[in-house]
Image: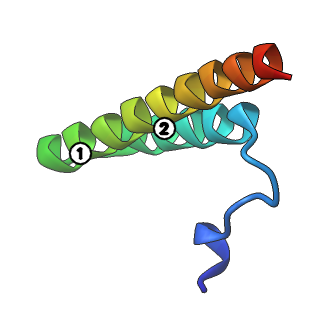
């Protein structure tokens, strides 16, 4: 697996928020509007994933 695509050992929302931040930094530098839009879409997906992991963690915490 390519180094940039490694997943963390644990589902950590902060990992995905950091990925979103890094992806947005690339988008800010993109000169192609389509590439910029795609990068921002990916960043938004990372943010949604982080939110889902946080929600799952809250639900799992209540179930214990």
Q: Nearer the viewer, residue 29 or 40?
A: 40
User: At which x and y percent is residue 12?
Assistant: 75, 40
When the figure is inspected, residue 1 is found, relative to residue 48, above or below; the finding is: below
Q: Which mark is residue 38?
A: 1
Locate residue 6: give its quadrant. Answer: bottom right
Within 10 Å of disc 2 (Cα), the crowding (few <14, some 14-19, many 20+) is many
Locate residue 37: give its quadrant. Answer: top left
User: At which x and y percent is residue 34?
Assistant: 13, 46
* Dot 2: element: helix
Residue lying farthest front?
63
Q: Nearer the viewer, residue 9 or 16?
A: 9
Name the residue: 69% across, 32% down: 13
Within 10 Å of disc 1 (Cα), the crowding (few <14, some 14-19, many 20+) is few
Identify the image quadrant of the N terminus: bottom right
Identify the image quadrant of the C terminus: top right
In the rendered structure, are the residues bearing label 1 and label 2 in contact, judged by CB atoms less than 8 Å apart?
Answer: no
Between disc 1 and disc 2, the foreground one is 2
Q: Give the distance between the C-alpha atoms of the residues marked 1 and 2, in whole angstroms.
A: 12 Å
Name the residue: 26% across, 41% down: 36
Q: State which tag comes first along the sequence, 1 or 2.
A: 1
Left or right, 64 with reference to 6: right
Left or right, 12 with reference to 34: right
Left or right, 53 with reference to 35: right
User: At which x and y percent is residue 45?
Assistant: 39, 36
Locate residue 55: give its quadrant. Answer: top right
* Dot 1: element: helix
Q: Which residue is mark 2?
A: 46
Name the residue: 76% across, 58% down: 8
């Amino acid at each position: 697996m390519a180094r940039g695509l490694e997943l963390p050992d644990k589902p950590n929302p902060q990992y995905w928020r950091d990925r979103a931040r890094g992806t947005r930094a690339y988008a800010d530098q993109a000169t192609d509007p389509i590439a910029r839009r795609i990068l921002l879409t990916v960043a938004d997906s990372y943010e949604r994933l982080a939110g889902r992991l946080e929600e799952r963690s809250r639900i799992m915490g209540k179930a214990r």
